[in-house]
Image: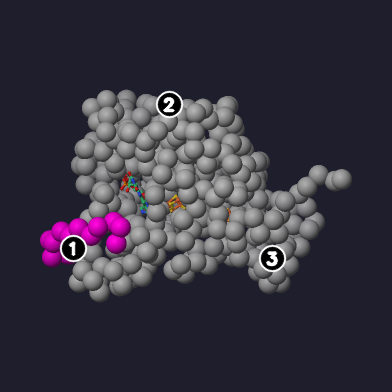
Amino acid sequence: MPPEKPQWRELFSEVVTSGLCTGCAGCVVACPYDVLGYDATSGVYRPFHVAEEGGPTDCTHGQRGCTLCTRACPRFRSWESEIDTFLFGRARAEGEDFGVAEEVLLARATDPSLHAAGQDGGLVSAMLVYALENDVIDAALVSRTPADGPAWKAEPAVARNREDVLKTAGSRYTYSANTLAYAEAIEDGAERLALVGMSCQASVPAVMAARKAGKVARRFALTIGLLCSKTFDDPLFPELLADRYAIAGEDITKINIKGVLQIWTRDGGYHEVPLKEAHAWTRPGCLACPDFAAEHADVSTGGIGAFADWTLTIVRTARGRDLLAGMRTAGVVETRSIEEDPGALALLGRLSRVSRRRWPESADPAPRRLAVHGVPSP
Ligand SMILES: Cc1cc2nc3c(=O)[nH]c(=O)nc-3n(C[C@H](O)[C@H](O)[C@H](O)COP(=O)(O)OP(=O)(O)OC[C@H]3O[C@@H](n4cnc5c(N)ncnc54)[C@H](O)[C@@H]3O)c2cc1C
Ligand code: SF4
Ligand code: SF4
């Protein structure tokens, strides 16, 4: 039998329509023939194949041997163990529920404007500014609020300098496939890119590199992951926040999730909405996602723990370690030991195990295995 060459046909049936697809758009940016589109309308966030070259379920280029979409998909078959082995040189050990990590610490930007603009400690923004200004990257794929849209809405964007980074800082809790900013970034000549994205997107550069997905893979020079348990569909804002809590979408200036939905409004107001009330608006692409901790990023970042204006930081790779070491030497970041906040580490483990239970038993067993055999919840 000839070796199998899985293409869009297999991706469509095994990931896109099986409930595993997160909408990360890795397949879309990897496709060299531009036959994959992306539906970013609320509640969809999925790739589709154009009608002309094989229709929705098959691909004429795939029939001729192209496999790039399956090689770029961080949910296709044994993605997790393949990427772990590629990135860390070994399979994940029992108990490593939030992925393989070199170090966990707390960090924040020393620059007051980056710190103030950031969601937590402004570390992500500080990393981007440092990488842009020290010849590590040419551009970063991030998210922004649309020019004519409300502050809660997110869409992909390119940051090329400090001003762009400041404008795009902070967290928005609707989905933005930042990978889709790739075309705009390289159009302007950028060759070395940083990708900022939630866990699902943070596995894209690594899976592309592990499965040798070509030029696109080689352009990702830095991956910064955002810890994530879910994103929300747009109707959360009119249906829950406006109708039930009288918080108009256009008045929202900032949202955070700290056990509850925290909402700040233009008039200086602060509101809390129980998280369980928002569950019904969870984006379908998140329902089977097993990765809370952005397990394949160079550096993963989150806001859990006792210190609200610090970023919980997981350093995973040599690239991440070198970047933070350079930033420490330059004095652009300050850090403190995670031992000052043991509760944050325990919560990181617990939330990671909760997410891993969402991965369906019918799919590759690795992402669930840790949920079943991992150390018990604290
Ligand atoms: C949807 C979402 C869910 C999250 N859930 C959790 C959680 O459950 N627990 C937890 O500890 N942390 C969570 N985080 C991470 C947390 O909110 C912070 O992003 C992280 O701590 C980094 O903070 P910072 O101040 O260093 O980042 P900043 O300096 O503020 O930089 C944040 C970066 O994230 C990008 N970004 C913002 N919103 C989006 C979006 N919707 N899609 C893609 N990129 C975006 C920005 O463009 C910016 O580059 C989540 C983040 C997001 C976006
Ligand atoms: S998970 Fe990402 S790469 Fe895989 S099919 Fe969905 S959008 Fe494409
Ligand atoms: S839970 Fe977060 S990381 Fe997982 S699919 Fe949803 S947005 Fe992506």
Q: Amino acid at mark 3?
A: Thr
* Residue 361, image x, y percentages: 57, 47
Q: Earlier in the sequence, mark 2 or mark 3?
A: 3
Q: Amino acid at mark 2?
A: Glu
The picture quadrant where one finds residue 224 is top left
Q: Nearer the viewer, mark 3 or mark 1?
A: 3
Q: Nearer the viewer, residue 196 or 226?
A: 226
Quarter of the image for the N terminus: give it.
top right
Residue numbers of the magenta segment: 263-277
What's the residue at 27%, 29% (across, down)?
342
| Label 1 Cα crowd, 10 Å radius (few <14 / some 14-19 / many 20+) | some
Q: Quadrant of ligand 2?
A: bottom right
The residue to which callout 3 is attached is 57
Tell me the number on the disc at residue 265.
Answer: 1
Residue 304 coordinates in the image, percent (x, y): 29, 41
| Residue 125: assigned label | none
Distance of mark 2 from mark 3, alpha carbons? 42 Å
Label 1: which secondary element: strand
332 is higher (above) or lower (below) than 219:
above
Q: Does the image show residue 135? A: no
In the rendered structure, the answer to whether residue 125 lies left or right of residue 374 reads left
